[in-house]
Image: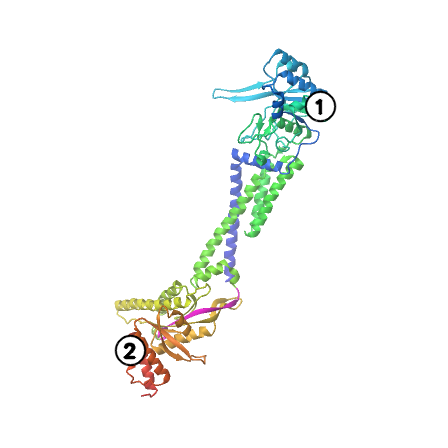
Amino acid sequence: MRMRDKPRQARQIRSRHLRLLVLSLTTLIAISLLSRLPAWSLLALRSFDYLSTVDDPRPPPGGPVIVAIDEPSLADINAQWPWPRSLHAQLVTQLRAAGARVIGLDIILAEPSTPENDNAITNAVGPDVVLAGDETLIETPQATQLIRVTPLQQLTEAGAKTGIASVDLSGDGTFRRIPAYEDGFAATLAKASGTISATLPAGQLIQSFGPARSYPTVSYYQALDPAHLLPPDYFKGRVVLVGLSLQNAPMIDKGGVDAFATPYTVHTGTLTSGVEIQATIYDNIRRGLSIEEARLPVVAAYILISVLLAAATVWRSTGWLTIVTSAAALLAFAAISFAGIRLAHIFVSPLGPTVAYISVVFGQAAFDYAEERRNKRQIIRAFAQYISPDLVRRLSQDPSQLKLGGERRTLSVLFSDVRGFTTIAETLKDDPEQLTGLINRLLTPLSEVVMDHGGTIDKYMGDCIMAFWNAPLDEPDHALHAVKASLTMQSAISTLNRELEREATQRGGRPHVLKMGVGINTGECIVGNMGSTRRFDYSCLGDSVNLASRLEGASKNYGVALLLGEETARLVAGTYTVVELDRIIVKGRTVPSPVYTVVHDADAEALAAHRAYLEAKYAGTLAPSDPAFDRLAADIPELAGYYAIMRDALTGSGEE
């Protein structure tokens, strides 16, 4: 058997490996196609949001200072916005006097105001001032138009520099990349401050530094009088950015003026002001902190490695260890991506490797689960032909029970045997096919009756069936179910006899008439797996089992089809009419055991007469000529054969 199983197992392993390889290849193709979708890119960028902010980085030291046009300033200045440009001129003068190295006004000054105000700001600006410009792309069905808005010409002629403050947003409206402007606002600030002279990393991912108001921020009105309202040298040598920055950061669902979602929005749900975003861009440029996205070959290799790792994880099998390994692998993908951001300033999205790994591992796990379920169903169907389906289900749920050992339980044990089957077998000795067919036709309905009534078939012994109730599953009414099963078995035998008689009539032969005797006893037994370490059966043993077998053999001596032990009779007496027949000493026992049977048509008077008959029988005062035999045979027809046998026994013993 083992030699035959090895090729089959090898085929199953090869089939599993082939399915795993197909799954891995399908996963690679599917991810290649999915990665072209815009939604995939947004999911990858969302993973960047979490990874780039998970350790809550803060602004680098020596970075910009924000002068905020905020609620306190609006209240203190008490002037309608936009404020007079002479006020901005005063601010620039104060900041320059306070030692600011570069001043960036994130305020669009593109349209003329009053000559006095325009002259005031013109006189205040110089090469150390960067003014904001704006660039807008307008798309219509007729044309695409790029509109660039720059400060007044007189301001740039006075030495002020222009920087485009527009930002690029991803498809989900989140700011993540350094704007692709060589003259971007933050880039111009960096150049004016002498920070950089190399090519800017336009389009690279940006490293955020905390939620809104993470940068050092003072109110506009404070910067107008720094000597009295701020610490000494607060602005000395610093880059100062001026712009709208409310103290209460707007929520993402309510929007805001010059405020944008950033990677930190996934944590806080708030927007960050445009002037703080310019400060963030500036720090990314001056510190070289921007993050480059990994190129396609690197991403493809990373995904391929994850697929190979997943295939290796489930190459042999899947189980609880697969879950642990998968959790470790997914954490490793996230850790690798995080390390790339922090150590190499390269972002390799964990999305592709994670989806690839999960698809392969859980896809194979699903295949294995389906295969296991299919095999389990096949095993249950196969073994249910031999043992109780309840036992099969119990063993399939708890295989640890497949070991030698037993437990002490009260069982109702049934033995059934066909009377005279040896003679029938002798008659059919030259026709083994017919004999085998007859056996199968006999045992099939009887077995179905036992299992339909919750019994466990222990074994077949030729034409004999041994079964028991109350194991492996608890059954409080086990004795009642056993007796009901025995009565139904008698009906099944009658049905089979009618079929055999009809078939014999059709072929002109004599039918084989089947009669069955049943013995049932209830008592304490040892039940469990018994046998050897290589082969064992779920069976029961004990004195109660032996008595049930003896009762079945003794039933023919009393002319009844069913003989019950004392405990069985007691347990079913509330449902059936049970009558005692005798007290016998069966082989292997020394104590007399009362035996009973079930009758269906007996009134109280007849039962009382039967009890009187038994008292006389036990007292030894009963004679063969006693009229009780004939009277009881008429009153309880089911026991007519029993009374005849008892009378013959007395006659044979010589009693008068």
Residue placed furthest toward the top = 115
Which amino acid, mark 1?
His
Q: CA distance from mark 2 to mark 1?
A: 128 Å
Residue 255 falls left or right of residue 512 = right
Res 220 label: none
Please tell me which residue lies in front, 418 or 640.
Answer: 640
* Residue in view at x 36 percent, y 65 percent: 445
SS at circle 1: helix
Q: Is residue 417 magenta?
A: yes
SS at circle 2: helix
Res 633 label: 2
Q: Is residue 570 magenta?
A: no
Which amino acid, mark 2?
Ala
Closer to viewer: mark 2 or mark 1: 1
Mark 1 lies on residue:
228
Vertical order, 256 against 513 (above or below): above
What's the magenta region? 403-422
- Magenta portion: prevailing SS class: strand
